[in-house]
Image (tube, helix red, strand yellow):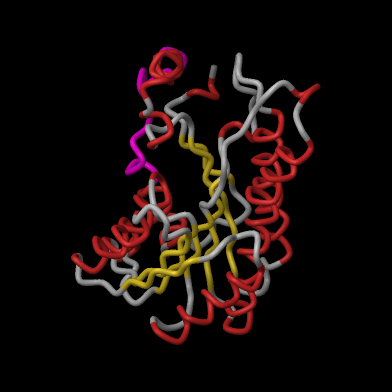
Amino acid sequence: MELFSLDGQVAMVTGSGSGIGQAIAIGLAEAGADVGCFGHLSNGGLDQTAERIRALGRRALTLEGSVTKASDLTGAVDLIESQLGPLTVAINNAGVGAGGDAETLPLDHWQRVYDINVTGVFLSCQAQARVMLPRKKGSIINIASMSGSIVNRDLKQADYNSSKAAVIHLSKSLAMEWVDRGIRVNSISPGYTLTPMNRRPEVADQVKVFERDTPMGRLAAPDEMVGPAIFLSSRASSFVTGVDLVVDGGFTCW
């Protein structure tokens, strides 16, 4: 449908070397967008994402960098604009999981989570908005988590939970700051998802608990975050801003 088409759009996806970020980057290309893939090149995932995008007949760039470095993000946006065209869609997915007993959690562990999950999202939005605002056009989508709205039973992760709550409210705050300047800002909060982290043999028992506690009886596939991302990127959501779209298989209803 034309409403959901991303033909002619140029997107940037952070953390697009695996999992949800990789699925969304490829999904945006399937909808018609050219994509700048930002992240780490060390495991080859970023190159694989770009190759799959090019196989769809769309253009792709691999952009190595860290979301904790404003210069890396600014340089990536500049490359996207010079080689692909004006940036119109941004998906900020880069993030890390964490956890541990709050009373003994080392400060450097806490700080790393916030540096990547919160400051990294802010710096990404800032770099992207700097080119979008003068044109008064753009959609920014930040990947949060249902853990930003609820506390996961039996998981000690005050650092992660609070960082994702910050992403949700940061998105709402930026949405209102830029609402009359042509940029829409929303967030997506996935529930338990079968990313590479949850495919490890050592967490198999924990995954069974996640499946049991999710009303739909299973974890999401990363591809199930593509539809929500396309919706929020496209003209189909032209009157949607400041929303946290929860995609959790019903988990937060219970």
Q: Position of residue 141 (x, y in %)?
A: 53, 56
Quarter of image, res 168? top right
* Farthest front residue in view: 42
In the rendered image of this protein, does residue 148 appear above or below residue 154?
A: below
Residue 7 part of the magenta-drawn span: no
Which residue is at the front of the view, 147 or 197?
197
Quarter of image, res 57? bottom left
* First to last magenta residue range: 212-225
In the rendered image of this protein, does residue 6 appear above or below residue 169?
A: below
- 240 on left or right of 35: right
Q: Position of residue 193 (x, y in %)?
A: 42, 33
Which residue is at the front of the view, 204 or 3?
204
- 214 on left or right of 150: left
Which residue is at the front of the view, 99 or 91?
99
- 140 on left or right of 192: right
Q: Position of residue 6 (x, y in %)?
A: 34, 68
Quarter of image, res 121? bottom right
At x 61%, y 33%, the residue is: 98
- The N terminus - image quarter: bottom left
In the rendered image of this protein, does residue 19 appear above or below residue 213?
A: below
At x 63%, y 53%, the residue is: 242
Residue 223 part of the magenta-drawn span: yes
At x 68%, y 71%, the residue is: 180
In the rendered image of this protein, does residue 48 appear above or below residue 164?
A: below
- The C terminus - image quarter: top right
Q: How many circles with numbers are drawn on the protein?
A: 0
